[in-house]
Image: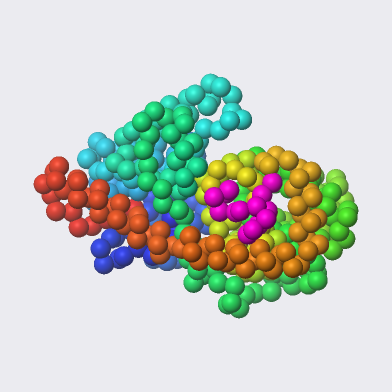
């Protein structure tokens, strides 16, 4: 969404952002001068917030809503439809997953069916993301528009801060990097276990974990118990992601599922060798053995062996780096993504104009 706001044609669209939590994204948007409002809730379908959302849409004279993710769409859709405002829904990753209890999964499929059937257009960020929806939701339709990266920001040829010096990480260490929320689906605990096993075989290996979340305290205790505090470094979420990436050698994303992971694309745009799990949109980005390594989700021994193999082979790291850069350049550019999404906006607004006989010129996100 940040890339979309940064690249959108301001002569034709006027973006405004509604978020349901504070955080780094909101801070970044405000620093960019983008009007950003927060109505706090961490729950999807939070009926207690719908009236406030409706007031916001009316006060800001919003004419089109683009909702990113289940929580956003479920908390804005009713208010938008009651005001005859069309909604575009981007599914960045479904709220239902195979590892959920049957009742939970059934309810979430029903919720997604409600959202997708009432949105003007659905966007899937990968073909597999769309297929997952089609497998569970009858008559589901969506456009596939891949996430894109701003390659002006994520440019390995630029100069960057010395993050290794800042964090006292040896300059000659092979630095493995994880940037994500510390939640079960991102698998930080599995990565720590795999790294601990790999580090016993490769004394020059170091792990940097960047992020926050409900599993962070457990992750830190796991590291203390294993005696790896000198070789595993923790950091909170940071705004200087390109600097962090520039300092690393290998980027790892061991998720149980993904829509199309932005963090992975950012790492590849910076020319990093990547290891990821063969899930959803990730396997549309990484071709195993060509521009990175794919391992089965939840397979800690396979992740360990991949870490050992790649960390010990600088030539392979460089080959994956070159191929990763080419992958992002040709398939996942933010400008291309933005133009494709703008075309969806024009189509939706054109249809809405025909229905309501109005001349809509201003767009709010």
Boundaries of the magenta span: 282-295
What's the residue at 29%, 60% (across, down)?
A: 14
Relative to the observer, which residue lies in front, 293 or 168?
293
Q: Position of residue 152 (x, y in %)?
A: 49, 72
* Scheme by which the image is coloured: rainbow
Relative to the observer, which residue lies in front, 238 or 194?
194
Q: Position of residue 47 (x, y in %)?
A: 38, 31
Q: How many marks?
A: 0
What's the residue at 84%, 55% (across, down)?
A: 199
Q: Is residue 308 above or below residue 159?
A: above
Q: Position of residue 142 (x, y in %)?
A: 37, 42
**Residue 186, picture quadrant:** top right
Say whether residue 75 is left or right of residue 299: left
Q: Is residue 165 above or below residue 83?
A: below
What's the residue at 14%, 46% (across, down)?
A: 354
Taking the view exactly as shown, the residue that stands out farthest to the top is: 103
Q: Is residue 201 above or below residue 75?
A: below
| Residue 293 among those drawn in magenta | yes
| Residue 201 among those drawn in magenta | no
- The reply to whether residue 54 is visible in this rendering is no
Say whether residue 213 is left or right of residue 47: right
Q: Position of residue 355 (x, y in %)?
A: 15, 42
- The reply to whether residue 262 is visible in this rendering is yes
Quadrant of the frame with the N terminus: bottom left
């Amino acid at each position: 969404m940040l890339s979309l706001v940064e690249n959108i044609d301001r002569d034709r669209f006027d973006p405004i952002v509604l978020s349901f939590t504070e955080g780094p994204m909101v801070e970044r948007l405000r620093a960019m001068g983008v009007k950003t409002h927060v109505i706090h809730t961490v729950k999807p379908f939070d009926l207690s917030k719908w009236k406030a959302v409706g007031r916001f849409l009316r006060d800001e004279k919003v004419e089109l809503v683009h909702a990113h993710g289940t929580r956003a769409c479920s908390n804005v859709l009713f208010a938008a439809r009651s005001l005859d405002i069309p909604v575009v829904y981007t599914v960045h990753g479904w709220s239902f997953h195979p590892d959920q209890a049957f009742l939970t999964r059934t309810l979430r499929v029903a919720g997604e069916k409600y959202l997708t059937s009432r949105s003007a257009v659905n966007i899937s960020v990968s073909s597999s993301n769309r297929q997952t929806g089609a497998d569970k939701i009858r008559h589901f339709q969506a456009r596939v528009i891949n996430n894109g990266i701003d390659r002006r920001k994520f440019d390995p040829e630029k100069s960057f801060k010395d993050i290794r010096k800042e964090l006292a990480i040896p300059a000659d260490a092979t630095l493995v990097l994880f940037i994500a929320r510390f939640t079960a689906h991102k698998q930080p605990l599995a990565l720590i276990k795999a790294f601990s096993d790999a580090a016993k075989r490769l004394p020059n290996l170091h792990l940097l974990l960047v992020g926050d979340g409900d599993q962070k305290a457990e992750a830190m205790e796991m590291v203390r118990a294993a005696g790896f505090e000198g070789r595993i470094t923790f950091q909170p979420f940071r705004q200087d992601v390109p600097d962090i990436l520039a300092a690393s050698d290998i980027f790892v994303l061991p998720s149980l599922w993904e829509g199309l992971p932005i963090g992975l694309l950012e790492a590849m745009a910076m020319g990093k060798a990547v290891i990821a799990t063969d899930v959803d949109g990730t396997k549309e980005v990484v071709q195993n053995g060509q521009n990175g390594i794919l391992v089965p989700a939840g397979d800690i021994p396979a992740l360990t062996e991949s870490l050992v193999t790649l960390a010990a082979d600088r030539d392979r790291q460089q080959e994956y780096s070159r191929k990763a850069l080419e992958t992002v350049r040709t398939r996942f550019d933010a400008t291309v993504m933005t133009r494709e999404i703008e075309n969806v906006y024009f189509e939706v607004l054109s249809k809405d104009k025909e229905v309501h006989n109005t001349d809509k010129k201003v767009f709010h996100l």
